[in-house]
């Protein structure tokens, strides 16, 4: 479940973040003090729930909600306000709830019962990023087999991007480092995408991919991933999955992230 919180008052944003993490410990949470950055983020990653302060200087929460709904109509909007008598009745905003500041864990749990758009929480894949990269159908202990190593690396990079859309040019830069983009490389990328999709389709989980014109991404809501849990400060990512300093050790482009995660552990 991908959640964002937006408030230009940093102290209030910190309080909201704390309440969300307490109420929704398994969510993937991003916090922003600038609405414009939140809009840019929503354009790259599918947002399930947005907690928005109504009164902000650059762009008020009502306008921000309209932008988010245009990007993804299934985004659930939850407004926050410091004014007990504030009413949304005069605005045609498809909001699930509005909460009085300071936001509490209990208020968020109550708002979750009122969501207008259902959120799928049934993970179809279990993805291992700590150590070597492997992909499993949920409930299975046998990893999926990719007939081409580059097709598996492509899927690994999509997992690494956590729902962010990847263009063909970006994939070439990462997977064919140092090689110039030309027709031959383009054909290789297209072949890799086809092989990856075939593996996922035959496993019955191709819908974890979000395919658009000239870009591709994964639906993080359908994926249980140790890396995602780690970033969400889930204790299981350390105690159960046991991150020991290795992240996607199969791939050189993952080395920087491995180093950053090691610093987070210290």
Image (cartoon, rainbow, N blue to C red):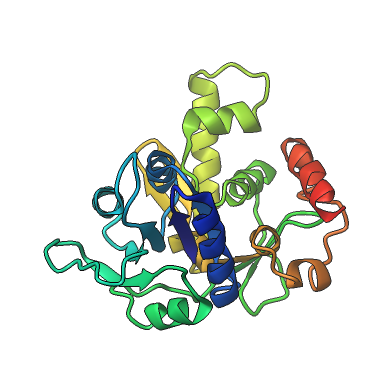
- Indicate the position of residue 47 as horizontal and vertical percent values: 41, 57
Q: Against 263, is 4 above or below?
A: below
Name the side, left or right, on which 95 lies relative to 224: left
Name the side, left or right, on which 228 lies relative to 193: right
Name the side, left or right, on which 111 lies relative to 150: left
- Asked whether residue 241 is in view, the answer is yes
The residue sitting at 80% across, 73% down in the picture is 240
Q: Nearer the viewer, residue 177 or 62?
A: 62
Q: Against 26, is 67 above or below?
A: above
- Indicate the position of residue 105 as horizontal and vertical percent values: 52, 77
Q: Against 221, is 240 above or below?
A: below
Q: Against 209, is 123 above or below?
A: below
Q: Nearer the viewer, residue 156 or 96?
A: 96
- Indicate the position of residue 96 as horizontal and vertical percent values: 29, 72
Q: Nearer the viewer, residue 31 or 220?
A: 31
- Indicate the position of residue 16 as horizontal and vertical percent values: 51, 64
- Asked whether residue 250 is in view, the answer is no
Name the side, left or right, on which 142 lies relative to 116: right
The residue sitting at 55% across, 41% down in the picture is 192
The residue sitting at 82% across, 42% down in the picture is 259
Q: Which of 245 and 18 is in front in this view?
A: 18
The number of numbered badges drawn on the structure is: 0
The residue sitting at 72% across, 71% down in the picture is 142
């Amino acid at each position: 479940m991908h959640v964002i919180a937006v408030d230009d008052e940093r102290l209030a944003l910190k309080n909201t973040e704390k309440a969300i993490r307490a109420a929704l410990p398994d969510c993937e949470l991003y916090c922003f003090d600038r609405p414009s950055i939140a809009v840019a983020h929503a354009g790259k990653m599918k947002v399930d729930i947005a907690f928005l302060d109504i009164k902000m200087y650059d762009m008020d929460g009502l306008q921000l909600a309209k932008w988010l709904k245009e990007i993804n109509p299934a985004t659930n909007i939850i407004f926050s306000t410091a004014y007990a008598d504030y009413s949304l009745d005069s605005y045609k905003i498809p909001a699930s709830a509005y909460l009085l500041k300071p936001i509490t864990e209990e208020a968020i749990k109550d708002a979750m019962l009122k969501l207008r758009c259902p959120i799928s929480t049934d993970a179809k894949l279990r993805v291992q990023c700590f150590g070597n990269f492997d992909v499993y159908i949920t409930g299975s202990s046998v990893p999926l087999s990719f007939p081409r190593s580059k097709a598996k690396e492509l899927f690994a990079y999509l997992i690494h991007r956590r729902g962010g859309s990847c263009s063909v040019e970006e994939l070439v830069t990462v997977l064919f480092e140092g090689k110039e983009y030309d027709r031959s490389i383009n054909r290789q990328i297209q072949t890799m995408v086809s092989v990856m999709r075939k593996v996922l389709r035959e496993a019955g989980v191709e819908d974890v991919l979000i395919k658009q014109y000239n870009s591709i991404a994964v639906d993080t809501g359908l994926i249980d991933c140790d890396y995602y849990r780690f970033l969400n400060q889930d204790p299981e990512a350390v105690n159960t999955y046991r991150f020991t300093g290795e992240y996607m050790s199969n791939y050189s482009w993952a080395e920087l992230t491995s180093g950053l995660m090691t610093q987070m552990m210290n």
